[in-house]
Image (spheres, helix red, strand yellow):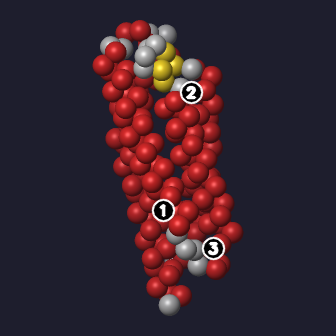
Amino acid sequence: MKKNLMMVYGQTLSRTIADTEDVQKDLEPYYTKLKTAMDADKLSDLSDADFADIQSEFQDGTDRYLSYNDKLKKLQAPARFMGKHQTLKHAYDTYANACQTMTDSLNVKEHTVDTKKFAQAEADQNEAMDRIIRLIQTIMSTNA
């Protein structure tokens, strides 16, 4: 039974991380387009349709992150990983919420970005993802 729980836990973590990476790859071109326009102070050069599309894609990606977050919260961890799993859940929750904050920083109606909110969300995402990666590596290397 313990071995089975370990296997399910490891597979679920691997799948969640792979799915997260897939979403990141899907969102990369939208993020790059937006960030390039923001950095060049040319947000107005993005068409309304492009801006709305970016916001929509960000929201779709965030919704997927939130669903992965729910899976992690419900996942039963083997006893020896309980502490690390709690920390992982917190880090992923921070990541998913930072993605929502970034999405919310885009105002499609006014064609603006709350740059302070966007930058903070970006920093929070990077920090949370660094923690997630370290935790997953630790758990998986212990699992081996």
Residue 61 visible in image: yes
Q: Nearer the viewer, residue 100 or 15?
A: 100
Q: Nearer the viewer, residue 58 or 31?
A: 58
Left or right: 125 as drawn, with respect to 61: right
Residue 28 visible in image: no
Q: Which residue is mark 2?
A: 118
Local packing at callout 2 (Cα closer than 10 Å; few below 14, some 14-19, many 20+) is many
Give how far across and how far down residue 138 sits, in percent: 60, 66
Between the C-alphas of marks 3 and 2, the distance is: 33 Å
Q: Nearer the viewer, residue 47 or 22?
A: 47
Between the C-alphas of marks 2 and 1, the distance is: 26 Å
Task: Identify the mark nearer the N-term, 2 or 1.
Answer: 1
Q: Which residue is mark 3?
A: 81
Mark 3 lies on a secondary structure that is: helix
Between the C-alphas of marks 1 and 3, the distance is: 16 Å
Q: Which residue is mark 1?
A: 71
Asked if residue 18 is positioned above or below residue 38 in the image, the reply reads: below
Residue plotted at (45% across, 76% down): 8
Residue plotted at (57% across, 39% down): 98
Mark 1 lies on a secondary structure that is: helix
Asked if residue 55 is positioned above or below residue 81 in the image, the reply reads: above
Give how far across and how far down residue 13 sits, in percent: 48, 65
* Kind of residue at disc 3: Phe
Residue plotted at (32% across, 21% down): 50
Classify residue 54 by image quadrant. Answer: top left
Q: Nearer the viewer, residue 133 or 44?
A: 44
Left or right: 138 as drawn, with respect to 7: right
Extreme residue toward the left, this view: 49
Asked if residue 136 is positioned above or below residue 117 in the image, the reply reads: below
* Kind of residue at disc 1: Lys
Give how far across and how far down residue 72 sits, in percent: 52, 62
